Amino acid sequence: MPSMANFNYVDGVNPNLLCCICRMPFNDPFTTQTCGHTFCRDCILQSLDHVYQCPIDRQALTADDLKPADSIIRSLVDELVVECTNQTCSHICQRQLLEQHLQSSCPYVEVPCPSRGCDQIMLRGEAVNHRCEYSLVTCDACDTEVEAAQLEDHRIQCYQQLTTCDLCGLQFQRSAKSSHQNSCPESPMQCPQQVNGCSWKGKRVALHSEHISSCPYQALSGFFSIFHERTQVLQDENTVLKRRVESLQTQIRTIEIQLQSASLALGPWFRNSNLGLSSPETSISDTLRSPDLPSHQRPRLQTVSSPRSVPEGDAFAAYFPPQEEIQSYERQQLSAMERPAPDRHLEHPVRSIHRNSWSLGQGWDALHTPASRTSKQVASAVAPLDFSCTLEGTLEGLRESIVALSTSMETLGRRNDIALTNETLRLNEELMSLKANIHGLRMQMHAMMMDNAQLTGRTDPLLFENSFPTVSTHRYHYMSNTQSATKL
Amino acid sequence: MSSISARRLAKELAEIHSEGCPVGINLVKADDFTCWWFTIEVMGESLYQDEKFTLQFRFDSGYPISSPAVQFVVTDGKQAPIHPHVYSNGHICASILGNEWSPVLSVVAVCVTLQSMLASCKEKQRPVDNDRYIRHAPDNPKKTQFHYDDDTV
């Protein structure tokens, strides 16, 4: 029995099951009753030979304080899986079963020769086939078992004795037994074509005299040999092909995985580009659900050649849901903007202001409400991506859309600038006329007050000062005028 | 050499290789299971700043029940640290290497203990009986019966 320290544990062992002294899983664990520490029996006994204290906490300890560890600990370490201690043996089992394995079944354990009288030592696995002078062999003549060393002597006697064949009754010496068995006419035989399906059985004498000449399989023996050869070739080819199919299947599986990841990365374009390859017309008509897609297709192709010359109303219609209201608005606005005459630009916003004749804020709102509506539509509407197109085509389309959008943004900005300038000019003019009016009113008021003062003969210094044009800004005039008006 | 000590040392060596030594301690050689060398230096502020010492462990077949023979290497230009418990021949007067050795201690644990012994040193000086001791000191420090009087260091 090899030393217990030579166990090779198959799995990692819980560190709590390691003995602190040998650092291996407990072997025959014992626990100290004084401090509750557990060690291998051999380890702690050796340590106690050295010094009478617990190796962990140095408490006084004698062999009497040791008791076998709890059965739960014993089971835990006994059930650890170990390799067989014979390195050539690949057997693994629970530690507690290893001894049994070594005693009875491990083929690499050295055992004495099983033959009585032989003192040779050999591996158990080899013992079965071991032949020594003591191992029993069967005499071929009389079927009795004799030791190998005595076989020769036995044969000399045995061979001289006469024996009778059980089948044909012929008497011969035992030495001729084996040759007789090969020629006894009565011995049971099978047709040599048995491998090819002949089921004939009979005596040797009948085989050669009757059967062979009439056996249909024997007649076909030439065919069978050719057939066997061919089958062999086919079988070989089959194995080669099987292997090839297996490798191809593996390749296909890897390709499938790659394809899946690629399709995942490509998203909706993967399927469509695939369909597009087979039949572009159907794939487009399949995926065309939104009615504005064809109109999108057309301007997108046009913008490729000259993005700036595109009728932008159509381009916008492609990007926003087909609401006639918005489209018409856009067309109207853009066509107005695109007219080359600069006086139209000036005239149009002014006219709208005059027509509406609201306050300034309202007019500004009215100017911008449709624009803010369209911007809301941009945010809410999903850009109509053309999944029927290839990824590159869609990207190209999107890029063109952005170009078109930036162009329209530019025009919009320019238009707003012009509108703002016009509005400011008009407001300035109005302000000026209002100022003039106010000035006139103030002068009138002043004259009235002077007349009044002369009539009553009293002067109000505050009123006089405020109303006198000592301060030059119009704004102040206006304010003071209001004050005096309130006082009046 | 019995297989228990060899297996225990093999296990300790495997742990050193897999988990590494503590800071300041490095394995120099462990070619067999009889003699290992470590370098040891004191980290942080101490009297032994920027000094590196070499420790020698010698194991017998009784390891880990019996303690390893541990000393500083003083050959090949190597020096033992000047410490009240370290003789100039490299022998160390430390209780855990003598009667307080416990089989649960390991090589790395001894290194760490000696590292902290050096780190806590207050004054660099040789043991008072240094000259007398090295005149008659045996080759193996385990054969010396040290008298452990100071447990402050």
Image (spheres, coloured by chain):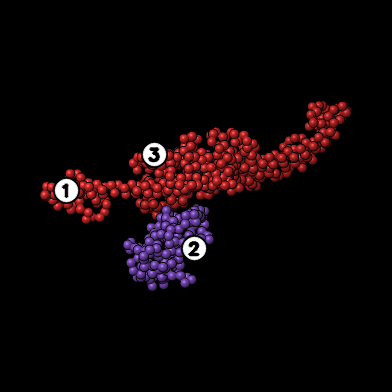
Chain colours: A red, B purple
Name the spot of residue A460 as percent of width and height, x first. 14, 50
Circle 2 crowding by C-alpha within 10 Å: few under 14, some 14–19, many from 20: few
Disc 3 is attached to a residue of which chain? A
Answer yes or no: is residue A104 visible: no
Answer yes or no: is residue A457 visible: yes
Disc 1 is attached to a residue of which chain? A
Q: Are marks 3 and 2 on the same chain?
A: no
Circle 1 crowding by C-alpha within 10 Å: few under 14, some 14–19, many from 20: few
Q: Which residue is mark 3?
A: A355
Quick check: A162 left or right of B56?
Answer: right
Image disc number at residue A451:
1
Callout 1, which amino acid?
Asp
Please report the residue visible at 63 percent of the width from the left and 46 percent of the height from the top. Answer: A123
Question: What is the distance, in whole Å, between disc 3 and disc 2 at their CAs?
Answer: 99 Å
Question: What is the distance, in whole Å, between disc 3 and disc 1 at their CAs?
Answer: 44 Å
Question: What is the distance, in whole Å, between disc 2 and disc 1 at their CAs?
Answer: 120 Å
Name the spot of residue A296 as percent of width and height, x first. 55, 39
- The label nearer to you, 3 versus 1, is 1
Circle 3 crowding by C-alpha within 10 Å: few under 14, some 14–19, many from 20: few
Q: Which residue is mark 2?
A: B28
Please report the residue visible at 82 percent of the width from the left and 33 percent of the height from the top. Answer: A224
Name the spot of residue B11 as percent of width and height, x first. 49, 53
